Image (tube, helix red, strand yellow):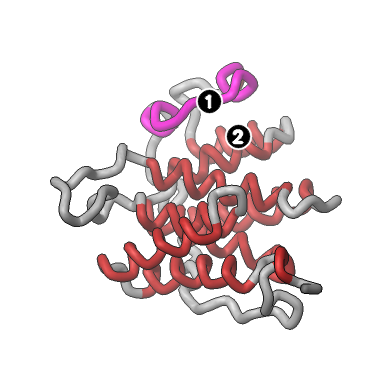
């Protein structure tokens, strides 16, 4: 049994998100989480493995997994994107409302076309506070919306910026996800700025 995914079967997990047609054909409710992950891996359905783990892990571990995955593409992130990742890590280290709002602000700044934006937005959607303006009645996010964001961060990072190593990336990230599911701690230390990402990509050379 996975320490952080103690479910006896996957019935409740696969009800939390929309499965792909391929995953629907493979995953039956009585499967254990370990068996489901192994089955999807055998078929090289990497996106489906990511979706499953992201929606199976508890909120902190799911967001921490997505954040840790960003390390594999550290040299590709702009300064603003690193700040978004670090906003998530600051919240992971000390979850509070101020840091949750800060993460959302940085997610909005970099946008959701990039993986770091989704990592930071996962914090905002963590279920620990309202997702509307402070002067409005509180509205909580739908359950497991953080899992959607964590999975989006990983799947986008596998492809954007474009590169040839997406398959290896998926394999490494999935192994990390299994380790976290088995109790490995998550990283809340800030990502350093790489030498070549101190300026946003769209301003380099200007």
Q: Nearer the viewer, residue 105 or 60?
A: 105
Main SS of residues in magenta? loop
Q: Is residue 182 visible?
A: no
Q: How many marks?
A: 2
| Residue placed most toward the observer, 35 or 64 | 64
User: Which residue was labeled with disc 1?
Assistant: 19
User: Which labelled disc corresponds to residue 35?
Assistant: none
Q: Residue at x 58, y 43 (%)?
A: 50
Residue name at image x 58 percent, y 38 percent: 37
Q: Position of residue 51 (x, y in %)?
A: 54, 39
Q: Are marks 2 and 1 in contact (CB under 8 Å)?
A: yes
- Looking at marks 2 and 1 on the same chain, the residue that comes earlier in the sequence is marked by 1
Residue at 70 percent of width and 49 percent of height: 158
Distance between the alpha carbons at the discs numbered 2 and 1: 7 Å
> Can residue 59 be found in the magenta stretch?
no
Circle 2 sits on which residue?
48
Q: Is residue 112 above or below residue 197?
A: above
- Residue 67 visible in the snapshot: yes
Split into 4 quadrants, where in the image is the C terminus?
Answer: bottom right
Q: Is residue 137 left or right of residue 42?
A: left
State the residue at coordinates (49%, 28%): 31
* View extreme (front): residue: 206
Which range of residues does the magenta coloring cover? 12-25
Q: Please rate how many residues cluster around mark 1, counting C-alpha atoms within 10 Å: few if below 14, some from 14 to 19, many from 20.
A: some
Give the left or right position of residue 14, taking residue 112 as reference: left
Q: Residue 105 at what x, y percent from top left?
A: 41, 62
103 vs 196, left or right, is left
Which element is circle 2 on? Answer: helix
Q: In the rendered view, would you say 150 is above or below 106?
A: above
């Amino acid at each position: 049994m996975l320490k952080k995914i103690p479910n006896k079967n996957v019935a409740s997990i696969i009800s939390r998100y929309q499965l792909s047609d391929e995953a629907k054909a493979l995953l039956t409710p009585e499967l254990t989480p370990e068996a489901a992950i192994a089955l999807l891996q055998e078929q090289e359905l990497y996106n489906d493995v990511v979706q499953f783990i992201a929606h199976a892990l508890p909120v902190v571990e799911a967001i921490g997994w997505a954040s840790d995955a960003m390390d594999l593409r550290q040299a590709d992130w702009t300064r603003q994107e690193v700040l978004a990742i670090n906003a998530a890590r600051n919240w992971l280290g000390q979850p509070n409302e101020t840091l949750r709002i800060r993460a959302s602000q940085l997610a909005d700044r970099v946008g959701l076309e990039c993986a770091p934006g989704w990592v930071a937005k996962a914090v905002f959607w963590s279920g620990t506070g309202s997702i509307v303006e402070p002067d409005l009645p509180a509205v909580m996010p739908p359950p497991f919306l953080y899992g959607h964001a964590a999975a989006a961060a990983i799947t986008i990072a596998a492809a954007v910026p474009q590169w040839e190593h997406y398959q290896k990336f998926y394999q490494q990230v999935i192994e990390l996800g299994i380790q976290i599911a088995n109790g490995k701690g998550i990283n809340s230390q800030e990502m350093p700025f790489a030498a070549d990402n101190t300026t946003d990509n769209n301003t380099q050379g200007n």
